[in-house]
Amino acid sequence: MFSRRHAIRIGLTAGALGVTGATGWTAQALSGRGTRGTAAAAAVPAAPVTPFSVPLTRPPVLAPVRRSATTDYYSVVMTKARREILPGTTTELLTYNGSFPGPTIRARSGRTVVVKQVNSLSMPTSVHLHGGNNPTADDGGAMDTIAPGATRTYTYANSQPGATLWMHDHAHHMESEHVYRGLSNVYLLGDDTEDALGLPSGEFEVPLVLRDARFDADAQLVYEMDDAFNRTTILVNGRPWPVLKVKGRKYRFRLVNSCNLRIFALQLSDGSAMTQIGSDGGLLARPATATQLLLSPGERADLVIDFAQYRPGTQLVLKNLLGPGPVEEVGQVMRFDVGARVHDSSRVPATLASLPTPRRATVERSFELKMDETSASPQGYINGKGYDPDRIDTTVRWGTTEVWTVTNASTLIPHNFHMHLVQFRVLERDGAPVTGAEAGRKDTVLLLPGQTVKLQVTFDSHRGVFPYHCHLIDHSAMGMMANLKVV
């Protein structure tokens, strides 16, 4: 999947691709950016948090305000709230219904969800269901915003297989700060086929929303554009380096990378394999086992870990092997404390889902992602152009299948590529066919500096205008976004 050359260029070390310090791609990329590094160094940080001293909490599950035979109705208010993140203090956040992360919506494939979003903030917002197959009017586009004090109702038909989706702000030039300060939540879409597999469920199905943050001495979030180097407090479900007590049995973890910029390279501290059963667009055809998982902003992964293989009392750390930042901070994510073995009737079948054979492509296109890497005010580009909301960059005919070749032309900085509306299939990475988890349904794909991926995508659901962009979300706010029109 990723060559050693690419691993080294973004900060993964040799051997086991171990944790880096502050010498990875971000340090190099920021080295020529004026006073940005000086300002960051002058800021007074929050008092350190002892890792694994707080319990993992789960985002609350949002209850419908009304249900009909076909539809669940929800009400969400975007509001400021103060919540405890660092122990003994409170932090002001932008929230959905006062929760950080926002409350989880549990939906069903084929059953409609209607969400009334009330914007009680002082700035425009836009709510995008990331990974959802929705028409333009309900997509939550960059310029289709909700004014302060206004209300907007989004309708999601959920006409797609079960998957780990998530919702987040998408108001252009504001999305970076809005997401960083808290405007995101998990949207778990289930279906009958998945239920019949016997996967871990109930209390043994746990969402893990990963993000990083930077705090000042008053425990308030510090926001600066393109500030990955200083966002070194790792949060899971809004808790810093938490610990989860688990029983000696299988658990299903629904991972979402909700960071603005940080790419995680996840590994269990004993080096044992993790079983991935799903990616962005839902279940894989069959389980994929690996000792490491790369997860870039916007990507999701569905993992099963069987804690029955460990002795009771084992403390298992979920490590992060990728910088930037000090190893003692960014090199660990959370800890699992293993309890006694218990009866476990769940299973991971050898066959999970039937993925459709990709259709024959009739159109091929090429896209280049690039960013100013030494400018004090960097801009992002797709095919040499910054984002213009009034420009249609790509027009496709409804019903066609296309192959898109996407290249990261930056020399130091990773990007990724996210398409609204569709799930695509990754065919190749640097000319080699992809395998394992990357061969499933995807809507976001990582590109390390110099890498090229080839994607196959069919446009057969909705007509209209939809964005595609880098989902290192600070980069899209800098202009690395374009418009697609399906006619």
Image (spheres, rainbow, N blue to C red):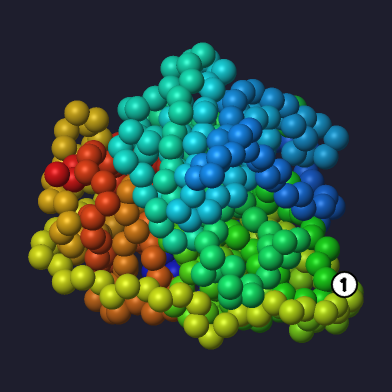
* Nearer the observer, 180 or 444: 444
Residue placed under numbered mark 1 in the picture: 339
Which residue is painted at 29% across and 57% down in the image?
Answer: 408
Q: Residue furthest front?
A: 69
Categorize mark 1 by other alpha carbons within 10 Å: few (<14), some (14-19), many (20+).
some
* Nearer the observer, 392 or 31: 392
Where residue 261 sits: x, y (%)? 48, 47
The answer to whether residue 138 is visible is yes
Give the image quarter of residue 75: top right
Report the amino acid beneath label 1.
Gly
Which residue is painted at 39% across and 62% down in the image?
Answer: 442
What is the total number of numbered labels drawn onto the structure image? 1
Whether 84 is drawn above or below 130: the answer is above
Whether 420 is drawn above or below 14: the answer is above
Where residue 6 sits: x, y (%)? 39, 69
Locate the N terminus and report the quarter of the image it occupies.
Answer: bottom left
Locate the C terminus and report the quarter of the image it occupies.
Answer: top left
Which residue is painted at 37% across and 73% down in the image?
Answer: 355
Horizontal relation, residue 101 to residue 440: left or right = right
Horizontal relation, residue 306 to residue 447: left or right = right
* Nearer the observer, 333 or 462: 462
* Nearer the observer, 9 or 438: 438
Which residue is painted at 53% across and 85% down in the image?
Answer: 350
The answer to whether residue 5 is visible is no
Where residue 249 sits: x, y (%)? 77, 76
Where residue 184 sits: x, y (%)? 55, 40
**For the residue labelled by badge 1, is the local secondary structure a helix, a strand or a loop?**
strand
Horizontal relation, residue 340 to residue 8: left or right = right
